[in-house]
Amino acid sequence: MVSSTVVCGSTNLVFELDHDTNVVAVKKEQSDNGRKEIALGWNMHTPCSLDIKEPEANDELTGATEAYMAEVLARYTDRWLERTKNNLGYQLNSDFNYDALGPLQRFSINNAGDPFIAGNYGVHSRDFEVGVLDWFARLWEIKKDEYWGYVTRGGTKGNPHGLFVGREMFPDGILYASKEAHYSVFKVARMYRMNCVKIETLASGVIDCGYLKECLLKNKDKPAIMNITVGR
């Protein structure tokens, strides 16, 4: 039996792995001193079917690696096709085709930095990035000279930047977010050491505006930083 202990406040979470059954059991134990310490155990990995190894010296002649990678890609393509057919419960759109962008995959594109300021790396796609920003600005009826932004890979990257701006503008502000908000909101609040208030929701998932009003009135002396959740 392998055991790892993680201390959360005054509560220990003990993870125990049974080698015979590969079952992980989790139990809570009260910490004696309440200190936030971590007792590291083993990192257990599940078996992986993808074997990564260095190519042989004569690989270019035999083509063994190329053949192996073709087999791996074919296997994973079949797996993803099957899983896509039955993928439920996650907010995504599977109706897309990026084949036309294939020729661009040969370039090392990098949009580092502010999309509105020319950088020192010439292989970039800032034209596309600013085009996307302009489209949303028109959708929200914002004039070009009245907005700034950049394109991220998703909410897990966008939320940290939005909350960072809020914290920098209002260092003593309180973050208010629906309890149904994206998990990254609360993770980022902990990382930035922001005072965060989770707002209760109605049965439909809509934020409880009455409860929000109560929370705001309790903290009238503090700026409010609002995280707005739409469509979850």
Image (cartoon, rainbow, N blue to C red):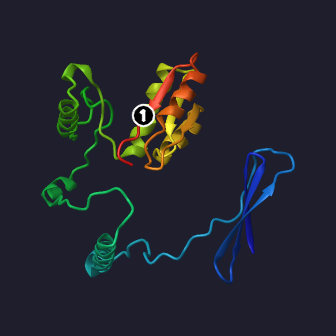
From the viewer's perspective, is 25 left or right of 117? right
Q: Residues within 10 Å of mark 1 (few under 14, many from 20)?
A: some
Say which element carries label 1. helix
Image x and y of residue 21, in percent: 66, 82
Residue at horizontal 76%, vertical 51%? 11
From the viewer's perspective, is 80 left or right of 191? left
Up the image or down, 119 lies above or below 91; here it is above
Identify which amino acid the numbered label 1 is placed on: His
Image x and y of residue 231, in percent: 35, 46
Where, by quadrant of the figure, is residue 78 drawn?
bottom left
Image x and y of residue 222, in percent: 56, 19
Residue positioned most to the right: 32
Quadrant into which the N terminus falls: bottom right
Q: Which residue is mark 1?
A: 161
From the viewer's perspective, is 11 left or right of 66? right
Front position in the image: 53 or 35 = 35
Residue at horizontal 59%, vertical 22%? 219
